[in-house]
Amino acid sequence: MLEKENDYESHSLESGPDVLVDCENVGVSFHHQLILAGIDVSVLRGQTVAVIGESGCGKTVFMKTIVGLVAPTVGSVSFEGQRLSEMSLMQLTQTRKRFGFVFQNAALFDSMSILENIAFPLRQNEEVSDSDVRDRVMQLLSEVGLPAEVARKYPAELSGGMRKRVGLARALILRPELVVYDEPTTGLDPIMSDVINELILETRRRYPVTSIVVTHDMHTARKVADRVLMFYPRRRLQPDESQVLFDGSPSDLEHAEDRRVRQFVRGEAGERLREISLESEA
Ligand SMILES: Nc1ncnc2c1ncn2[C@@H]1O[C@H](COP(=O)(O)OP(=O)(O)OP(=O)(O)O)[C@@H](O)[C@H]1O
């Protein structure tokens, strides 16, 4: 197994951390419904941050806000010290090229070969010859552990795990500095999930990428992350409570002070059972 190279603690260096993404008092509402509020989170360059929390607590919205796909209703998100909201369209487009997205369902184009799927961001953003495109796709296929003949195939011919690996290869083809993963192991068997976990670690080892991994899979969170954020649904918090219930290293999760964190990571329903039955009676 690959070792995680940058421990969460190692970022508290006296020289000061190198912040890549900075969320300041971020809030997001949809149709007057508050989904995120008061989020103050800085992601350091090179970190792998797992974002956990129950369904609907706002993990995906948080991830989309970080990469500028959702604009915060209040507060701001900065990338390398520059607010996304203050960037021109051209700057935002340039910045987005530095992000890679690994979508939950791989989101491949069914009518394109795997080669063209992986090459898509490259062709959109750079003038590259066909032979260079091919070389880069082949390199990426090998990095994600897929055989060269997969390049000629179409998404429908691949298993779910292979499609996820193709999605990862496509996300990496522009050598992004920030990669966001939305549920990278959902729907996969435990072995294939671990293959994906290893690939996330391998990617981090190969080059200094910063990663944000939204996941329900505690094994993934523990294995790939050097920092875990646990979100909680805003509507179930007291007004003065932070929506980020836990922010620390995976090894501290089990012993978190907050009972709701311990229950979540152990998969215990706890008082949620009573709350859910009350909600259904209301
Ligand atoms: N574009 C949107 N318009 C309106 N509501 C939205 C939008 N995107 C998300 N929401 C709502 O925001 C809330 C949080 O959604 P989000 O997808 O971030 O949850 P999540 O924690 O990622 O959940 P899951 O683990 O089930 O994927 C949900 O109630 C969802 O319906």
Image (cartoon, rainbow, N blue to C red):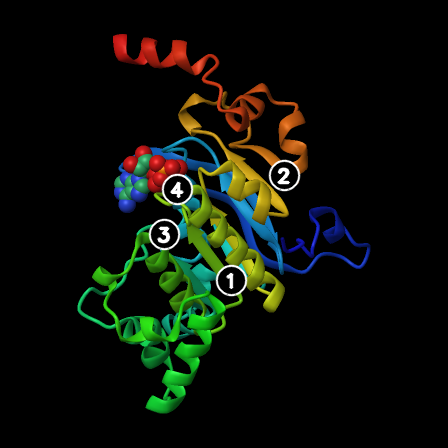
Between tags 4 and 1, which lies in front? 1
Secondary-structure class at tag 4: strand
Mark 4 against mark 2, which lies toward the viewer?
A: 2
Disc 4: which residue:
28
Tag 3 secondary structure: loop
Residue on which the image places disc 3: 70
Mark 4 C-beta closer than 8 Å to ligand 1: yes
Quadrant containing ligand 1 reads: top left
Q: Is residue 240 visible?
A: no
Task: Give the crowd class for mark 1: few <14, some 14-19, many >=20 residues within 10 Å.
Answer: many
Circle number at residue 250: 2
Amino acid type of the residue that numbered disc 3 sits on in the rendered structure: Val
Query: In this rendering, is residue 76 above or below 231?
Result: below
Q: Quadrant of residue 109?
A: bottom left
Mark whose residue sits in front, 3 or 1? 1
The answer for how far apart the CA atoms under marks 4 and 2 are is 27 Å
Density class for disc 3 (Cα within 10 Å; few <14, some 14-19, many ≥20) is: some
Ligand 1 within 8 Å, label 1 CB: no
User: Closer to the N terminus: mark 4 or mark 1?
Assistant: 4
SS assignment at label 2: helix
* Residue at the spot 58% in from the left edge and 52% down from the top edge: 48
Please tell me which of labels 2 and 3 falls first in the chain.
Answer: 3
Q: CA distance from mark 4 to mark 1?
A: 22 Å
- Is the Cβ of the residue at disc 4 closer than 8 Å to that at disc 3? yes
Q: Residues within 10 Å of mark 4 (few under 14, many from 20)?
A: many
Instruction: Identify residue type, mark 4.
Output: Val
Q: Which residue is mark 1?
A: 178
